[in-house]
Amino acid sequence: MGKKNIGKFLFISCIGVVSFLIPFHFEGSTNILVGILTTLVKRLLSPVSKAVVLLLIAGSAAGSSYDYVMGKKGKEVPEWVHRRFGVSGIYLASKIFTLVMVFMCNFHLLPEHVIRASQDMVELGSTLLALAIALSFLLSFLTDGGLMEFFGEITRPFVRPMFRVPSDASLDLIASWVGASNAAVLLSAEKFRKGYYTKREAAIVMCNFSLVSIPFCMVVAEAAKVEPYFLPMYLLLCGLGIFLAMVLPRIYPLNRLEDVYVADRPERRKAGEQNFFSRAVASGCGAAEDFSLQKVWKTGINTMASILLNLMPIGIGWGILGMLTVNYTPIFGWLSWPMGWILHLLGVESAFAVAPATLAGFIDMYIPALLVTGIASVRTRFVIASLSLIQIIYITEVGAVVLQAKLGVDLKRLAVIFMERTLIALPIIVLASRLIV
């Protein structure tokens, strides 16, 4: 741990912090650097963005179709094709549905009321394109330069008493918090299978710390049109997420899960003779030593591809389906009627209009933000966007992995955890929104 590595660690971390966490004044409002870059890129690409988005969705659907069909036939496909396009049947159907709907909306081949209900979702493709370009190559400076490792070591002494998980899970918690939720929950499931966690510990980590990545938080903020408030929103999510992670492990159903391992426990990491701050600096410097522009390029390409070839087509498809379901069927209206009264009692504007969005996050956490794009109240959009990001339990991704991991968490218990997070978080978010917006 020489001075060179300490300097490199500080320099890289400063770039990450300035890019994602420091607000700047821009065109009459406050926004983070990545948000400003997204606005500028979107403006620059506006003449061609619709065509580019359609081509990307078509390419994504074609690649996933090829991978899926070849897999069903038992034939091998190139590893990079499977890594980039491999999805389950439901996600493939989502991509094809998105391609058809975006094509027909762009060329006005659908009834006007359907186009009108879907238009915000179609336009979102342009935002996602700009966002992917703006943040993909900056994200590594925040996540891969040692900052996560530093805070992982700093939080190690507090992890077990606060969250009832092993102290050496601290780095996993930080990685889950800052990284992509799908990667985080899969990592936790794998560590459970290898004996690092009991069923209860794995469920606590997966159901409380698998927050969506910073890029996706930006996507949701853009979709809900609350991007000027991204920084306070993200800080609110961090504080509220920690509070929920302290409460939920102590109540049903997480406190009823078995404390049993499915594999022999590996040897626990020893703390060593250094004090925790020295270990934190050493961990950060170790990660910074491995940091290189080549890795930034590789990670940036992967992040951009993930957003444009998976998140964008699937998110737009689910958003269109959600909008059509909410606008033209009474299903969510019936189910969310009690939530409408709760929102009304909390003083949220357009309470019953946005009530379906409070439950739609159980399907996919991208849908709620899309459902409130037409709501006039910025504060209401802020509340729903924040709530959707803190709910975590959504069936299309995190929930599916939790169910498959066989932790003793079935669909009923998953729904209970979702509602606990919703009902505990909602009043706090509404109160915070009055101070922020």
Image (cartoon, rainbow, N blue to C red):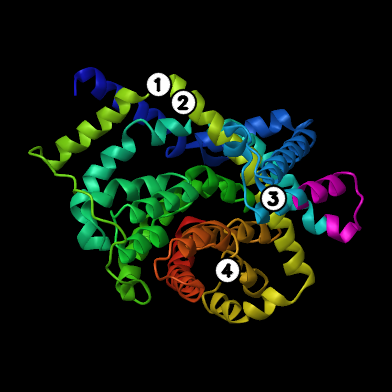
**N-terminal-most mark, 2 or 3:** 3
Q: Which mark is residue 292?
A: 1
Q: Which residue is mark 4?
A: 358
Q: Nearer the viewer, mark 4 or mark 1?
A: 1
| On-image quarter of the N terminus | top left
Label 1, label 2: how far apart the Cα atoms are = 6 Å
Looking at the image, how many numbered discs can be counted on the residues? 4
C-beta proximity under 8 Å, tags 1 and 2: yes
Q: Nearer the viewer, residue 84 or 141?
A: 84
Label 3, label 1: how far apart the Cα atoms are = 35 Å
Q: Secondary structure at mark 3?
A: helix
Q: Amino acid at mark 1?
A: Ser
Which quadrant holds residue 286? Answer: top left
**N-terminal-most mark, 2 or 4:** 2
C-beta proximity under 8 Å, tags 3 and 1: no
Rendered position, 363 above or below 277: below
Q: Nearer the viewer, residue 387 or 162?
A: 162
Q: Amino acid at mark 2?
A: Val
Q: Residue at x 62, y 57 (%)?
A: 369
Q: Residue at x 58, y 46 (%)?
A: 219
Q: Secondary structure at mark 2?
A: helix
Q: Which mark is residue 296?
A: 2
**N-terminal-most mark, 3 or 1:** 3
Q: Amino acid at mark 3?
A: Leu
At which x and y percent is residue 179?
44, 44
Q: Secondary structure at mark 4?
A: helix
Q: Residue at x 50, y 24 (%)?
A: 297
Neighbours of disc 4 within 10 Å: few (<14), some (14-19), many (20+): many
Does 108 appear in magenta?
yes
Start-end of magenta stretch:
97-115
